[in-house]
Amino acid sequence: MKAVKRFEHGSRVPGWDESADLDKDPKGIPDLATTPVPAELRAEIEAHMAKYPDRRSASLPALAAVQRYHGWCSPEAIDQAAAVMQLTPAYLAAVATFYDMFDTVPMGSHRVYVCTNISCSLNGGRALYERILDEADGDPDIDVRHFECLGACDIAPMASVDGVYVGPIETSEVPAMFEQIRAGKAVLPSKQLIKRKSVDPNAGVPGPPKAFGAPMGGVEGTDGPVAPIEQADDPPEGPEADED
Ligand code: FES
């Protein structure tokens, strides 16, 4: 297994042991009037804030939005979210450094998270992870990590590729998968969870894949998200359908 990356001081949090300059005032809440925030980013963060009575509850989706926009939770990105949310950058930085899926150092443009939890491991998840690591061959543009259960055990062994769930993946499919990642194409399209049929009669046709933290798409005429659930192509009808 790939070791969890640690910095020289032994922590996973960059710079946590840098001493504070006690002569400096703590960084306050950035002024939204003087902090340049892209209009669409501001609108998305404000939409998340509007869902909760306490704006701090929107910290995770706001950080996901700035990470998606900037590629990582850079100090500039965190300042922008802090300005919109009227929080201190320290508050948001504390949240960002707690969660694995937020990057507080620059990352490659692709994220491949391979599940190695129980269902996936029993179906070859660890071998798949090793094969994917080999194929990535240290490419700094592709961040490969193993993850605990990603909640898609029925397609084990699976991986999340730039937020798109794919599985079950055969190790023999890994080279094609990487060609698609590097070419910016859809990865193993026939094995994407989002392409599966739904038993939800209100579920619409899935839109383009959503990156981590992107707002869920609703179904026209409803305000609920689609729920990808498997169903047979032709659901049985009539009482005889219950007979085995
Ligand atoms: S064990 Fe892999 S998705 Fe649940």
Image (cartoon, grey):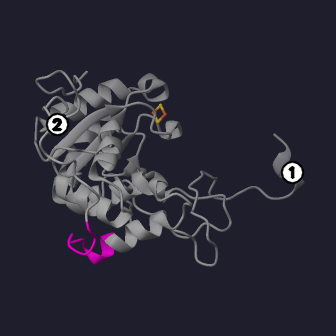
| SS assignment at label 1 | helix
Amino acid type at image mark 2: Glu
Q: Residue at x 18, y 48 (%)?
A: 25
Q: Residue at x 12, y 39 (%)?
A: 21
Q: Which span of residues is magenta-colored?
A: 31-41
Res 135 label: 2
Q: Residue at x 34, y 54 (%)?
A: 63
Q: Residues within 10 Å of mark 2 (few under 14, many from 20)?
A: some
Query: Is residue 236 visible from the viewing direction of this image?
Result: yes
Query: Is residue 176 visible from the viewing direction of this image?
Result: no
Q: Is mark 2 within 8 Å of ligand 1?
A: no
Q: Is residue 217 above or below residue 16?
A: below
| SS assignment at label 2 | helix
Indicate whether residue 28 is drawn in magenta: no
Q: In the visual, does 204 lie left or right of 123?
A: right
Nearer to us of marks 2 and 1 is: 2
Foreground of the two, 118 or 42: 42
Residue 43 in picture, x, y percent from top left: 38, 74
| Sequence order check, earlier mark of 2 and 1 | 2
Res 121 label: none
Res 240 label: 1
Foreground of the two, 39 or 89: 89
**Splitting the image into 4 quarters, where does residue 97 fall?**
top left
Residue 3 in picture, x, y percent from top left: 22, 22
Indicate whether residue 33 is drawn in magenta: yes
Distance, label 2 to label 1, CA atoms, is: 50 Å
Amino acid type at image mark 1: Glu
Q: Residue at x 38, y 28 (%)?
A: 116
Residue 121 in picture, x, y percent from top left: 42, 24
Name the image quarter holding the N terminus.
top left
